[in-house]
Image (cartoon, rainbow, N blue to C red):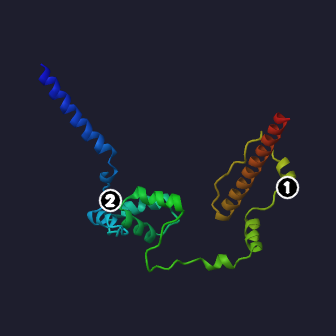
């Protein structure tokens, strides 16, 4: 009897020590993206060389849906380096961009750089006209919004749509002003 419990205890200690060593040994953590060549370079103190990994169009599309401002070349280059969509997305979220492939020049839009702030203001003010308080006060929140009816003329439809958008902006602004006034009353 004593012999079987001793054998069981010894087996338990051996298995436990193997499991504990395996858990706490960071040198042998399995990383599917590190090749034998990368491990050799890291052990020698050198910088790991990246092999080109297979990148399919689905991987590029996934990253592009999360980061539409990136070029396909940037995404493909980083995916070839990491081989992993998650790592590429994490790098994009951390840095705000991805590196360009070597030899590719970055094109900066020149037209926007030449515009002065007043030109940008003119574009913005032409798109959204200034709204006065009398415009906001004239909106009745209780009345239903104007009903858009279909028209054969594209110009008429666009004009009605612009009027509807302006009415929605005025209603939203009035609701906001009422809410802030109510909040100020509650605070006082």
- Against 18, residue 38 (above or below) is below
Judging depth in this view, the residue of 163 and 55 nearest the camera is 55
Q: Residue at x 65, y 58 (%)?
A: 151
Task: Count all numbered tags in the image, as a single digit.
Answer: 2
Q: Residues within 10 Å of mark 1 (few under 14, many from 20)?
A: few
The answer to whether residue 59 is above or below residue 77 is above
In this view of the protein, which residue sits in the foreground, 50 or 37? 37
| Dot 2 alpha-carbon crowd within 10 angstroms: few under 14, some 14 to 19, many 20 or more | few
- From the viewer's perspective, is residue 128 above or below residue 136? below
Rendered image: mark on residue 33: 2
Q: Can you give x and y, in whole percent of width and height, for residue 64 in the image?
A: 46, 62
Q: Is residue 19 above or below residue 116?
A: above
| Image location of residue 84, percent across then percent down | 37, 59
Q: Secondary structure at mark 2?
A: loop
Q: Which residue is mark 1?
A: 132
Q: Position of residue 51 (x, y in %)?
A: 32, 69
Query: What residue is shown at x 28% (from left), y 66% (from top)?
Result: 37
Q: Quadrant of residue 175?
A: top right
Query: Quarter-wise, where is residue 63 in the image?
Result: bottom left
In which quadrant of the rendered image does the N terminus lie?
Answer: top left
Q: Residue at x 83, y 41 (%)?
A: 181
Depth order, front residue of 32/178:
32
Give how far across and how far down residue 122 sits, in percent.
76, 70
Which one is in front in this view, the residue at disc 2 or the one at disc 1? 2
Mark 2 or mark 1: whose residue is earlier in sequence? 2
As drawn, the label of residue 141 is none
- Label 1 sits on a secondary structure element that is loop
Residues under labels 2 and 1: Cα distance?
Answer: 60 Å
- State left or right for residue 128 relative to residue 8: right
């Amino acid at each position: 009897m004593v012999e079987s419990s001793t054998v069981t205890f010894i087996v338990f200690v051996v298995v436990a020590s193997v499991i504990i060593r395996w858990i706490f040994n960071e040198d042998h953590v399995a990383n599917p993206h590190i090749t034998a060549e990368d491990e050799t370079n890291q052990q020698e103190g050198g910088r790991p060389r990246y092999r080109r990994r297979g990148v399919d169009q689905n991987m590029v599309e996934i990253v592009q849906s999360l980061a539409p401002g990136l070029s396909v070349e940037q995404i493909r280059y980083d995916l070839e380096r990491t081989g992993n969509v998650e790592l590429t997305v994490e790098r994009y979220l951390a840095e705000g961009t991805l590196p360009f492939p070597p030899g590719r020049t970055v094109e900066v839009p020149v037209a926007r750089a030449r515009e002065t702030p007043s030109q940008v203001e003119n574009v913005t003010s032409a798109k959204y006209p200034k709204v006065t308080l009398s415009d906001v006060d004239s909106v009745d929140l209780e009345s239903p919004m104007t009903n858009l009816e279909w028209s054969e003329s594209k110009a008429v439809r666009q004009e009605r749509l612009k009027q509807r958008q302006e009415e929605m902006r005025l209603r939203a602004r009035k609701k906001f002003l009422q809410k802030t006034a109510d909040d100020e009353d509650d605070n006082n």
